[in-house]
Amino acid sequence: MLEIQNLHATVGGTEILKGLTLSVPAGQVHAIMGPNGAGKSTLSYVLTGREGYEVTDGTVTLDGEDLLALEPDQRAAKGVFLSFQYPIEIPGVPGLTFLRTALNAQKKARGEDEVSAPEFLKRAREVAKSLKIDFDMLKRPLNVGFSGGEKKRMEIFQMAMLSPRFLILDETDSGLDIDALKVVADGVNALRSPDRSMLIITHYQRLLDYIKPDQVHVLAAGRIAASGGPELAHQLEAEGYDKYAA
Amino acid sequence: MSLSRALETGDLAELPSRRDEDWRWSDLRGLIRAIPPASPDASARGEGPFAAVCSETMLVINGGSARIHLAAGEKKTIALRLISRAEGTSHSADVAVTVAEGAELTLLESHESFGAGYITDVEMDITLGASAVLERVVVATEAADAIAVTLARVGIGAGSKFAQTTLAIGAKRQRIETRLAHPGAGAAVRLDGVYLVGEKRHTDLTSTVTHKGEGGTTDQLTKGAVAGQGRGVFQGRITVERGADKTDAKMGHHALILDDRGEVDSKPELLIFADDVACAHGNTVGQLDEQAIFYARQRGMTLAEARALLTEAFIGEVIDRIEHDGARDVARTWASEKLRGLT
């Protein structure tokens, strides 16, 4: 599914990713853990094509296709979804309007028919219910005045509605209490499937108790410093990241 | 000195120029080298933007006159279509609107273009009796190479309510001006505007409100976006004369510059000669939030779609203030279409 080879990237002239290599096969969930400043969020923005994150070397392919050559919206249409660490507030645009515009833009890019309003609303109601989101909240301007937990739930809601193939969850557990964490994890787990992969970026092991990864990688100083099974997450929790310090 | 005088007399010296303070950003004298011949008679085309929400229509084609009068207590919605179906010619229109005591008028005004290179001038006199209500919604869609000037002189009675929303996309030179004499006396004024200006278009929304008596309100909100080499001008002046105490006036003008080559010129003025008043103004010019654009694109919207959606949300606050449901929908759709064509 996703292949990253020797990825180097700079932000504002400073090299943050320094030769990162990673492979996430279809159907698998990989976790990226690492200390603050290791380049975890940079990786998520490089994969999604944010302006200001410049790739200086290396390749990223999704099912063999060069991801780095695509615009952010083209990557989204190919099925790349990023759940933001800090979801953006969009005043004046109801959540449902935003999401339907996005969904239809993706469908248009893929040459598919647009989703009709009734069809969209029916599905939105079902997904909102499963994520314990008050449907009226979706009619309000997106994320405006929402609590941290509500914003994260909205991210998962959007994710479920857009049915992406490759999911990146950037610090999705931050700002969530334990009940909200379970709801979010259930939502993510419901999306696990043989043709879908996930990259879970997290500082703490807590989220991985609920979303079980197939593999855990340690990102330190801009590259993968270690890889292992789920037990690596527990080891990191116990020992910290000190031994991976650059 | 005015465009209408120049068209009437053929004297270019009558044109306002950049030396006139109120015209310094919308100079006409440097722009018009000769007064073009008068536009020919023509027939209407299309139905106008408000056809679906209004059954009574008045037409003014290539200039002329129109009179709208509502008797005391009457209640009506009227579409006024000011049509320019002209190529390189000029025309003037004068319109008188009187709304007698206690009457209520919704005036849905469209400035429509089926031509090019014309000069059009509209002068309106609007009079509201005591406790009368007028909501005026103006959708001005001129040709890119037209010169279009509209001036409305508004007089309102005690306890009346005058609400206006002007939506404009500019022209080679477009100016829509409102001069309102406010008696105070419980009368309420809302004076709103939206401009969406692209290409090399220019629009100028100018207004003066003069509070002459005690206890009146004015609430003014204009929002605009410029793209390409578009230029938006906002000039708003609220004067509170001596003795016009208990006046409550606020003015807001907020603009987005979507391209580096776009320009916004703004002159908000509050001139206060009374003591006991509440007046406020806010004026901002900025750009769309890059983070919000990336967020929308990450969800699949193209750059153009993301910009249009966010700009639509930005100006939506003004459109939401239109009280007539049908007109509000027309305005929203119109703005949405114009935004998506904004380059």
Image (cartoon, rainbow, N blue to C red):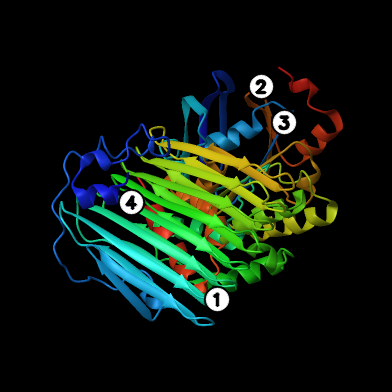
Q: Which mark is residue A34?
A: 3
- Gap between marks 4 and 1 measured at Cα: 30 Å
* x then y, percent, for residue B330: 43, 68
Q: Which mark is residue B149?
A: 4
User: In which chain is the residue bearing label 1?
Assistant: B
- Gap between marks 4 and 2 measured at Cα: 63 Å
Label 3 SS: loop
Within 10 angstroms of label 1, few (less than 14), some, or many (20 or more) residues?
many
Query: In the rendered structure, which amino acid carries the disc numbered 4?
Result: Val
Label 4 SS: strand
Residue at left 67%, top 66%?
A128
Q: Which residue is mark 1?
A: B101
Assess whether mark 3 and mark 1 are in contact (beta carbons under 8 angstroms).
Answer: no
Label 1 SS: loop
Quarter of the figure that contains the N terminus of chain B: top left
Assess whether mark 3 and mark 2 are in contact (beta carbons under 8 angstroms).
Answer: no
Q: Of callouts 2 and 3, which one flags the residue occurring earlier in the amino acid sequence? A: 3
Q: Nearer the observer, disc 4 or disc 2?
A: 4
